[in-house]
Image (spheres, rainbow, N blue to C red):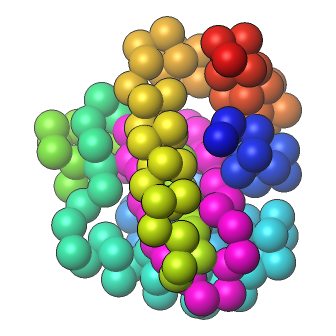
Amino acid sequence: MQISDILKPEAVKTLGACTSKKRLFHDLGDISFSAYALETGTVIDALMERENLGPTGVGHGIALPHARLEVVDQVCGIFLRLEKPIDFDAVDRQPVDLVFALLAPESAGVEHLKALALVSRTMRDADMQAKLRANADASTLHTILTETQAQAA
């Protein structure tokens, strides 16, 4: 599995007006509708339900919100670069500006875990973080996320 398998170019955005975790989940819901034709409310509810189990802010300004949905037939991702970091109850208490959300089928046990591990490894890389923070253009961000891994493969 590669990031290009789970992340469409139209699911990558830079947001300037995101002010809270709740607003972020609404933005993720809107993008999941436009990029993957998923019901906005269903996505928002699933992400918030998962977040209530424990925050998905993993540190270093990164959040990896994720949820399982009956209506999803394969793992799909959404990447957001926030121009203004938001509080996310992250483990290191740092505000979040890089968000990679994953939506997986209810039945995708191993696939969901593989995708989460792949995204986590990718986002933990300091060079990757620097490149993502240095670029605001969505197509450039998609290229950074998908090409780095393709070269390593």
Q: Magenta stretch containing residue 68, yes or no?
A: yes
User: Which residue is depicted at the point 53% across and 49% down?
Assistant: 115
Give the magenta-colored segment's residue range. Answer: 62-86
Q: Is residue 23 left or right of residue 95?
A: right
Looking at the image, residue 91 lies above or below residue 42: above
Q: Magenta stretch containing residue 88, yes or no?
A: no
Q: Quadrant of residue 17?
A: bottom right
Looking at the image, residue 30 lies above or below residue 4: below
Q: Position of residue 34 (x, y in %)?
A: 83, 70
Q: Quadrant of the C terminus?
A: top right
Q: Is residue 138 left or right of residue 110?
A: right
User: Which residue is depicted at the point 16% across and 45% down?
Assistant: 91
Q: Position of residue 117 (x, y in %)?
A: 42, 42
Q: Is residue 23 visible?
A: no
Q: Quadrant of residue 144?
A: top right
Q: Is residue 20 visible?
A: yes
Q: Position of residue 123 (x, y in %)?
A: 46, 30
Q: Residue furthest front?
A: 110
Q: Is residue 101 left or right of residue 12?
A: left
